[in-house]
Amino acid sequence: MSSEQMKEAGIEPPRTRRYLLRWLEKFRRGDYGIGGDLQHVKDGAAEVRVVEVPALKKDPSKQSNYEPTSLTLTPGHIKLVVNLPEGQEKPTGDTTKLKKVKGLKLVRGSTISGPYVKPKAGGKGSVGVICVQEGMWEERRGRKIDGGERRRAEVRWRRAVEEHRKNN
């Protein structure tokens, strides 16, 4: 759908059309943002966990003289942040089909780090939960006015009180 077609459909102002066109293009590219690639989501929450899996074999023709390094205790294994069904500690079946969760990374070897990830109690940082939140997939643009969205009402209320005191 083009901007002209959106205009004929009555989508105004132009800024709204540009916003929708940006989102259409993101979905065409498969860029769903944080949590867009999660498979196991229940009631708006997905559990992510650090698992140790065998490293995939490299193509021998492209192999260099250096061996890949790993922070695992088991040689030939790597650590991944993956989405597993809630309560499941280890992946079942073929581990070669596991995919890393986009946007999340490991810090200090076993702690999950990334936006909107909250550590799960008792997980020692290697288990986290991503919950759906307001504004999670919105594009951050523009500038803060009156302290930002969260404080806007408070800042405007204080300003109105001060103005009321001056006038009375």
Image: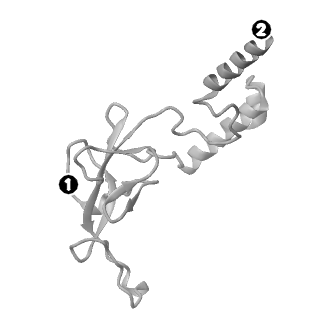
SS at badge 2: loop
The answer to whether residue 127 is left or right of residue 155 is left
Q: CA distance from mark 1 to mark 2?
A: 68 Å
Query: Observer-nearest residue: 74 or 21?
Result: 74
SS at badge 1: loop
Amino acid at dot 2: Asn
Marker disc for residue 168: 2
The answer to whether residue 140 is left or right of residue 34 is right
Which residue in the rendered view is the most extreme toward the top? 168
Residue 141 point in image, percent of width and height = 67, 42
Residue 164 point in image, percent of width and height = 74, 12
State the quadrant of the N terminus.
top right
Which residue occupies 21% across, 73% down?
Answer: 74
Residue 80 visible in the displayed image:
yes
Which residue occupies 44% across, 52% down?
Answer: 114
- Image quadrant in which you'd find residue 79: bottom left
State the quadrant of the C terminus.
top right
Residue 105 point in image, percent of width and height = 41, 59
Task: Rate crowding at label 2 as few (under 14), some (14 to 19) or many (20 or more) other CA atoms within 10 Å.
Answer: few
Image colouring: one colour
Q: Do tag 1 and tag 2 residues touch (Cβ < 8 Å)?
A: no
Of the two numbered discs 1 and 2 on the same chain, state the one appearing first in sequence: 1
Which residue in the rendered view is the most extreme toward the bottom? 65
Marker disc for residue 122: none
Query: Observer-nearest residue: 140 or 90?
Result: 140
The answer to whether residue 136 is left or right of residue 56 is right
Task: Rate crowding at label 1 as few (under 14), some (14 to 19) or many (20 or more) other CA atoms within 10 Å.
Answer: some
Task: Work out whether 69 lies above or below 38.
Answer: below
Amino acid at dot 1: Lys
Marker disc for residue 90: 1
